[in-house]
Amino acid sequence: MASANFETYVEANSSLHSWTPRLKLLSLSLLMFAFAAVKHLPLVLPMLCVVAVLYGLSGLPLSYLLKRLRYPGLFILMVVLLLPFTSGGTVLAQWGPLALRQEGIITAVLVVCRFVSILTLGFVLLGSTPFLTLLRAMRSLGLPTLLADMTLLTYRYLFETADMLSTMQRSMRLRGFGLRRQWFRLEGKTLLQLSGLLGTLLIRSYERSERVYKAMQLRGYGQLKQPQLAAQQPIDSRSLLLTMVTVAAALGFVMAEITFSTIIG
């Protein structure tokens, strides 16, 4: 039975793959926060250029990004479609009760570009760093052991939950329930069956988590001294250069945003 694929790491021989994980996590996270602070349109093009350069350095194929942006992109598209018609006071065009507003268009462009840029950086981080390596980097930066264990177990059992959901969906289809065809039909019977599916999935997931936790307790989890972290990967000159350039870019965006705010304000 094929399971859903949550693995995002892609083997490649690129500069970002060899970037020291701790520095890469800190640098890209700082850049994400800097992008989130962008509120002026002139900074959009430089932001997209920085993202394009980093994605090119990652060695990840374009199909990797497009495949993972598909569903989040549909969500953000539905959110921003209304902005040009509801936000702002400068009317550019009007069709009856609908008015296209300049401020709404600018806001929509900013939201979409920030969203795509931040999400792309996230995929660059996950695509160039194995999940366990990323988790070890978080631990070395001070992530509590309990949160690290919860993150690891959540990631591990996403695959089990996806397999369980796939099995339940297949069973429902074999019993005559066309799940995909009836998903948007608001019939009482259909909603009842879907709610039963989700309820059963939650109960089975909870029972599975109880069994796993008890098995971990029997093996001494929480009673033994936590093992020391393994020696961290040494920082090479390339990683240091990438970190300095990325941090400088993040600070540059923050300073530019402050400057624009001061001038316009």
Image (spheres, rainbow, N blue to C red):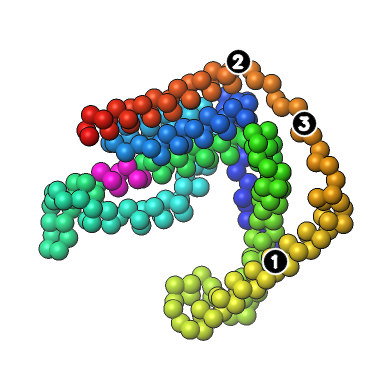
**Which quadrant holds the N terminus?**
bottom right
Residue 180 sits above or below residue 149 on the image: below
* Mark closest to the chain's N terminus, 2 or 3: 3
Mark 3 secondary-structure assignment: loop
**Residue 258 screen position, x and y as percent:** 32, 30
Depth check, front residue: 77 or 23 = 23
Q: State how far apart marks 3 and 1 are (Cα).
A: 33 Å
Mark 2 secondary-structure assignment: helix
Task: Answer left or right for 51 relative to 220.
Answer: left
Task: Answer left or right for 132 relative to 196.
Answer: right
Q: Which residue is the site of mark 3?
A: 230
* Residue drawn at 45 percent across, 37 percent down: 33
* Residue drawn at 54 percent across, 23 percent down: 243
**Residue 103 screen position, x and y as percent:** 21, 46
Query: What amino acid type should be assigned to the residue bearing mark 1?
Result: Tyr
Q: Which residues are magenta?
A: 106-112
Residue 117 sits above or below residue 189 on the image: above
* Mark closest to the chain's N terminus, 3 or 1: 1
In the rendered image, is residue 133 in sight?
A: no
Q: Which residue is the site of mark 1?
A: 206
Q: Which circle marks residue 58 in the picture?
A: none
In the rendered image, is residue 230 in sight?
A: yes
Front label number (1 vs 2):
1
Q: Which circle marks residue 237 in the picture?
A: 2
**Residue 169 screen position, x and y as percent:** 61, 70
**Residue 67 screen position, x and y as percent:** 50, 47
